[in-house]
Image: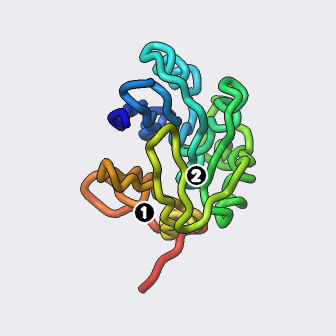
Amino acid sequence: MGQLNAGIVPVTPFQQNCAILFDMDDRNGVVVDPGGDVDKILAVLKDNAITAGAIWITHGHIDHAGGAMELKDALGVDIIGPHEADRPLLANLENQARRFGLTDPVRNCVPDRFLIEGETVSFGEHVFKVLHCPGHAPGHVVYYNRAAKFAHVGDVLFRGSIGRSDLPGAITRH
């Protein structure tokens, strides 16, 4: 099995971290959370000779899913995730873009497959367990690769803090 690697592409005015997970040997992988700036993501894939076989989404906020449909069209691959509880968020990406004054084209997102707790997704020999982690968004998922001791957590954690739970649709517990 080749080595799992992750590259980060900051996208959108929010500077959200779109991730490209890929195998160092065969250069195949996935794009996780393409919030926008699709031309930038495509350039990174091309410049690094990485072939993306799918798009994985952690949750339905604009900065994580706003470029998913455009990237799907460009790459001809499926959109996988998040959990179906984020369907309403994904169906309102265009409204989210207007609320934030974003000018880049954004389309509502319809994943090819929603995910459930405990199932797995993979590329090549790299297998990731899906963990449903509602809080930041009702359908938020985390992708965990046990072999590499690596988790892509989306917005469940922020640098130096936990993820926000004060956004519409967030789940808070007291």
Q: Residues within 10 Å of mark 2 (few under 14, many from 20)?
A: many
What percent of the width, then of the height, locates residue 114?
67, 57
Q: Quadrant of the N terminus?
A: top left
Q: Which mark is residue 139?
A: none
Closer to the camera, 161 or 31? 31
What percent of the width, then of the height, locates residue 79?
66, 43
Which residue does the numbered mark 1 point to in the structure image?
A: 164
Secondary structure of residue under mark 1: loop
Please report the residue visible at 68 percent of the width from the left and 43 percent of the height from the top.
Answer: 98
Please report the residue visible at 43 percent of the width from the left and 33 percent of the height from the top.
Answer: 22
Please report the residue visible at 42 percent of the width from the left and 30 percent of the height from the top.
Answer: 9
Please report the residue visible at 73 percent of the width from the left and 47 percent of the height from the top.
Answer: 112
Residue 27 seen in this snapshot: yes
Closer to the camera, 76 or 91? 76
26 up-or-down from 1: above or below: above
In this picture, residue 134 sits left or right of residue 156: right
When asked about the image quadrant of residue 170, the answer is bottom right
Q: Residues within 10 Å of mark 1 (few under 14, many from 20)?
A: some
Q: Which mark is residue 61?
A: 2
147 up-or-down from 27: above or below: below
